Image: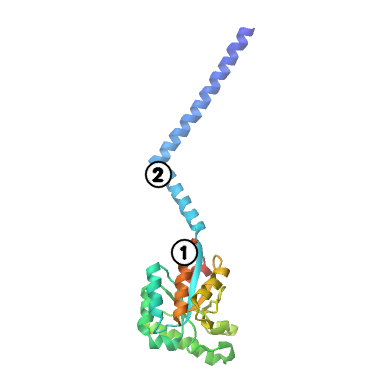
Amino acid sequence: MKKLRNILLGLDMLLILMAVGTIAENSMLYAAGRMEEGGSNRSIMSITEIDMQDLAEKKVALTFDDGPNAKYTETLLDGLKERGVCATFFLLGKQVENSPQIVKRMQEEGHLIGNHSYEHVNLSSLNDEAAVVQVDKTNEAIYKITGEYPEYIRPPFGCWKSNLDYETTMIEVLWNVDPLDWKTDHADTVVKRVLDEVQEDDIILLHDASESSVKAAFQIIDTLQKEGYVFVTVDKILFN
């Protein structure tokens, strides 16, 4: 009886080993088949790596108001190009007409161009007709140079007229970080104010109308890039 029990136990073990072997063999064949289908396993890994890289990026948008400035904007564009950064420029129609070649360069170098009214006026203090003229006149000035109408507007002082949404389809863009760079000529002060506040997906407000603001912009970029930030145009912040 004991001998028969031992034989049965031996058969059970043999069946178990055979089952394990079959599973292992099928797994190996499946893996080989996946590789032969064009490296599916490698593709899955690549997609995962790309997703992780996207998740790791910290985006921030650098914006400049009141330009183009005949004295300082081209220096700013030189530095942005050197650093591989695209920014967003909210332009005054009057300045656009004075420096069309700078506006064209902005477009050619991949920067996003937006509207900042024609004469830097508080749109909410104007009647509807006058406010629309400020917007449309600037759009036309930009279109004549770039062949494209801007889609984004930053109203001066952040004062928009909500009823103008019925007159224009432009998208209002405000900001998260304002270092008040136009109030000081100390670049380091501007840099500190930005770095103390900035977070992922923030929109930084600066101006390209002074040497200190341009220097501050370069320091902000250099510092934040070292911290892993990626600079994008505002549309990438608003809609991604």
Quadrant of the rendered image containing residue 107? bottom left
Q: Nearer the viewer, residue 92 or 168?
A: 92
x and y percentages locating residue 214 in the rendered image: 44, 77
> In the picture provided, is 77 more to the left or to the right than 12?
left
The dot on residue 110 is none
Q: What residue is at 61 percent from the left and 9 percent from the top?
A: 4
- Disc 1 residue type (three-letter): Gln
Q: Is residue 196 above or below residue 34?
A: below
- Disc 2 residue type (three-letter): Gly
x and y percentages locating residue 189 in the rendered image: 53, 75
Q: What residue is at 56 percent from the left and 66 percent from the top?
A: 199
Disc 2 is placed on an element classified as loop
- Can you see residue 219? yes
Q: How dense is the environment of label 1, judged by Cα within 10 Å: few (below 14), some, or many (20 and up)?
A: some
Q: Is residue 213 above or below residue 27?
A: below
Q: What residue is at 51 percent from the left and 57 percent from the top?
A: 56
Q: Is residue 229 above or below residue 141?
A: above
- Can you see residue 89? no
Disc 1 is placed on an element classified as helix
Quadrant of the rendered image containing residue 209? bottom left
Q: CA distance from mark 1 to mark 2?
A: 35 Å
x and y percentages locating residue 113 in the rendered image: 44, 77
Q: Nearer the viewer, residue 70 or 146?
A: 70
The dot on residue 39 is 2
x and y percentages locating residue 185 in the rendered image: 49, 81
- Residue wearing tag 1: 225
Choose the circle earlier in sequence order: 1 or 2.
2
Q: What residue is at 48 percent from the left and 66 percent from the top?
A: 223
Q: Nearer the viewer, residue 68 or 133?
A: 68
Q: Kindly report which numbered mark, 1 or 2, lies closer to the viewer in this rendering.
A: 1
